Image (cartoon, rainbow, N blue to C red):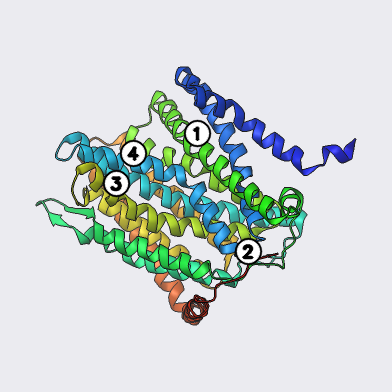
Amino acid sequence: MSSRVRHPLVAVVVAVTLTLPWFLSWATGAHASFETLTTVAVSGVAVLGASFLLAWGAETAEKDVPRAFALAVLAVLAVAPEYAVDALYAWTAGANVGTPRGTEAANLAVANMTGANRILIGLGWSAIAVFTVYKARATDDPAVEHRSGFLGDVVHLDRDISTEIAFLFAATAYAFLVPLSAATFDGTSTMGGIGILDTVILVGLYALYIAIIIRGDVDTHEEQVGVPAYFQAYRKPRRIATVLFLFAFSGLLILTAVEPFAHGLEDLGKQAGIPPFFMIQWVAPLASESPELIVVAYLVNKARSTAGFNALISSKLNQWTLLIGTLAVVYSIAAGQVAALPFDGKQVAEIWITAAQSFFAIAILTNFEISLREAVGLFGLFITQVLAEFVVIRTVAEPLASTYSLYILYAYTAVYLLLGIALFATRRDELRWLFGRTKATAREAMGRSDTGVDHAD
């Protein structure tokens, strides 16, 4: 009896069962009559089940494609809801050019995008690092090293992720220029825009990254257990069909469930008196990022912290390139002409603090490890900035609230930059090695481009 209970397909059935209430209600349209709390509960449970299906699909795929590519696909599917939410605001902005509604939607698109990116690092990277160290007590995760001193334990990262870090560095450097690429000055503040040039550069960076990693070798050294091991034992055609189904089904569920989940949380927040703009920048992205965080927590729980952090970094890279780059495309299509998605001075500051946070986070990972001290530092800077702005919004009247909010953003931007510069200065040798390794990886990948890689069993 116990052997049946332990069969891997039991876990799959449980995960699918979690998704069925939402899938059926969405397919029949019954979800439209749900109360807000019911929508949040049913869609949230579906996101949980879909996240496990997505993780199993990515792990199974590692038998046939390079792990970095499998994790890149996982990352794109896991953050697809964030793309959907941002695309909605960008489309609304393009369809209402020159109107207050269009201006507000354009600013919300940028606010939602920067909030999602900062949550991924400030909450995601830091929380997963702490969780990894905590789980290592039971799993003996070889990636965790226990060191003396206050919060001295560290999580070691796979040096094969140098390519992701290098491309993230390049995207971050360019992000500082995005507010200037279509900037004007209205007499009181700098006004920026995300244009087609930004799309070409940022999407081009991601396309080049994919072109490099897809030519990598298939990993054969890491044995799977549980559901992925069961699916990997299938013959290749059946295995590939299973992976495609898991990706397609979980992707559909995440794409359809997270937006109602996010909007439901927004409505609950409004009922609690939280400002709508604050909800759209922070609560909605937190909901849309939940599949990614669930997937990574699952990997860490299996002592696969290396794969977990690879997925987190890959998610940050695709959000920091594809997400920003596609906003101008959606806006232009809705507007009926090639145009730059505009935003105001507040969003200029939001982009710069997001880029500065990314700069500091990359500096932390340059030596391919993250300590508990560094994780707590990332979280501390993130949460204190969000809370400081929240307090200002709730206690200070306009226009002073907006002015103080800008002061907070610029102050934290300076702190992130100074800390990042200091770390890069002390780790310049590691930085040179990282870019050297990435250059060698790119040359090796392009050198094999004519012959390809045989992934046959």
Q: Residue at x 24, y 35 (%)?
A: 397
Rounded to the nearest whole Å, what is the CA distance between mark 2 and mark 3?
39 Å
Horizontal side, residue 107 vs residue 256: left or right: left
Q: CA distance from mark 4 to mark 3?
A: 9 Å
| Place of residue 351 in the rendered image (x, y in percent of width and height, measured from the top left) | 31, 55
User: Can residue 322 be seen in this snapshot?
Assistant: yes
Q: Which mark sits nearer the N-terminus, 1 or 3?
A: 1
From the viewer's perspective, tell me whether residue 80 is left or right of residue 236.
Answer: left
Q: Secondary structure at mark 1?
A: helix
Mark 1 vs mark 2, foreground winner is: 1
Q: What distance separates the C-alpha of mark 1 from that of mark 3?
A: 22 Å
Between circles 4 and 3, the one closer to the viewer is: 3
Amino acid type for the residue under numbered disc 1: Ala
Residue at the disc numbered 3: 330
As helix, strand or loop, the secondary structure at mark 3 comes to helix
N-terminal of the pair, mark 4 or mark 3, is 4
Locate residue 189 relative to residue 129 in the image: left or right. left
Task: Report crowding for label 2: few under 14, some 14 to 19, many 20 or more residues within 10 A (C-alpha).
Answer: many
| Residue 402 location (% of width, % of height) | 24, 43
